[in-house]
Amino acid sequence: MRIFLDLDGVLRRESSPKSKLDADCVRNFELAVLAHSDARVVITSAWRLVQPLDALRGLFSPEFGVRVEGVTPDFPEVEGHPRHAEVQAYLATRARGARWIAIDDEADEYQPGAPLILVNAAIGFDETCAQRLRHWLAQAR
């Protein structure tokens, strides 16, 4: 199972400092994922373009950081749903056939009907989002 994760608007509320994740959002996310040993996280956020993978892993607890397996490729010229295209490219090369879900604050980044937990950027990844993720992870087994 792959979870494709945006950071801004998800683990960092839109009102928070630009370079710091909100601890409560991170905690909600980590707790939901850590309960499922086969869940892996792939970063889709623009942060992946300016920070190496080890630095992105360091944004999380050490126990969770090992679950961050990679980042999506960058397709800046893609029209339409760029993150969806990046997710598909990642899956084709690294996890063909894997079940997946995206967590993002922008629905337009994905094709209609894509597996997506849409997060309110003003609130961030709260307990309601965590419940939705836990439910999806349980069903994906």
Image (tube, rainbow, N blue to C red):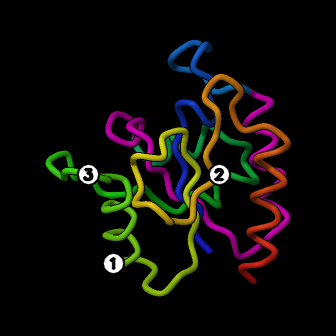
Quadrant containing the N terminus is bottom right
Q: Is residue 38 magenta?
A: yes
User: Which residue is drawn at the image coordinates 61% and 46% (left, top)?
Assistant: 118
| Callout in the foreground (3, 1) | 3
User: Which residue is drawn at the image coordinates 50% and 65% (left, top)?
Assistant: 114
- Relative to 82, does residue 22 appear above or below in the rendering? above
Q: Are marks 1 and 2 in contact (CB under 8 Å)?
A: no
Q: Of the residues shown, which amino acid type is indicated by label 3?
A: Gly
Which of the numbered marks, if any, corresponds to residue 37?
A: none
What is the distance, in whole Å, between disc 1 and disc 2 at their CAs?
A: 22 Å
Residue designated by label 2? 65
What is the distance, in whole Å, between disc 3 and disc 1 at their CAs?
A: 22 Å
> Percent from the top left, x then y, of residue 140?
71, 79
- Relative to 35, does residue 25 appear above or below in the rendering? above
> Percent from the top left, x then y, of residue 113?
50, 66
Q: Of the residues shown, which amino acid type is indicated by label 2?
A: Gly
Residue designated by label 1? 93
Q: Is residue 111 left or right of residue 16?
A: left
User: Which residue is drawn at the image coordinates 60% and 28% (left, top)?
Assistant: 121
> Percent from the top left, x then y, of residue 55?
50, 39
User: Which residue is drawn at the image coordinates 81% and 62% (left, top)?
Assistant: 134
The segment highlighted magenta reads 23-51
Comes first in the chain, label 3 or label 2: 2
- Relative to 91, does residue 56 appear above or below in the rendering? above
Q: Say which of 104 and 45 sits in front.
A: 104
